Image (tube, helix red, strand yellow):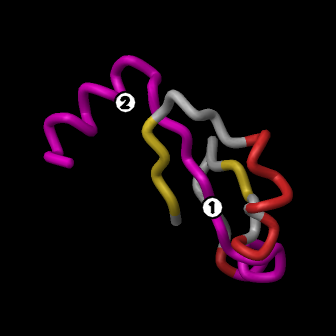
Amino acid sequence: MASDDVVTRLEKGDVFFLDVREPKEVEELGTFEGYANIPLGQIEQRLSEIPRNSLIVTA
């Protein structure tokens, strides 16, 4: 996706920020405001928490 497209989606509020690190990593390294933390090993069980109609940006 082109950076201009990402900026447009950000402006629309059509972006879901997903932090897939383990809680210990988030605690040690911090995260960005607005990111949802769902560890990679829990993604399958927590799919209902991830919007289907938004651009997903992961960290």
Task: Give 49 or 31, whichever is nearer the viewer.
Answer: 49
Task: Give 33 or 21, whichever is nearer the viewer.
Answer: 21
Q: Is residue 8 left or right of residue 2?
A: right
Rendering quarter of residue 21: bottom right
Q: Position of residue 7 (x, y in %)?
A: 25, 34
Look at label 2 and name its amino acid.
Answer: Leu
Q: Position of residue 43 (x, y in %)?
A: 74, 62
Mark 2 surroundings: few (<14), some (14-19) or many (≥20) residues within 10 A: few
Could you tell me which secondary element the residue under label 1 belongs to?
strand
Q: Which mark is residue 34?
A: none
Task: Give 31 or 52, whichever is nearer the viewer.
Answer: 52
Rendering quarter of residue 45: bottom right
Vertical comparison of 46 with 16: above or below: below
Mark 1 surroundings: few (<14), some (14-19) or many (≥20) residues within 10 A: many
Q: Is residue 50 left or right of residue 2?
A: right
The answer to if 48 sits in the magenta stretch is no
Choose the circle earlier in sequence order: 2 or 1: 2
Could you tell me which secondary element the residue under label 2 belongs to?
helix
Look at label 1 and name its amino acid.
Answer: Asp
Vertical comparison of 29 with 57: above or below: below
Magenta segment range?
A: 1-28
Q: Position of residue 46 (x, y in %)?
A: 82, 52
Residue at 27% over, 39% down? 6
Residue linked to disc 2: 10
Residue at 17% over, 45% down? 3
Residue that extends furthest to the front in the rendered view of this protein: 44
The answer to if 12 sits in the magenta stretch is yes
Residue at 75% over, 69% down? 39
Residue linked to disc 1: 19
Q: CA distance from mark 2 to mark 1?
A: 17 Å
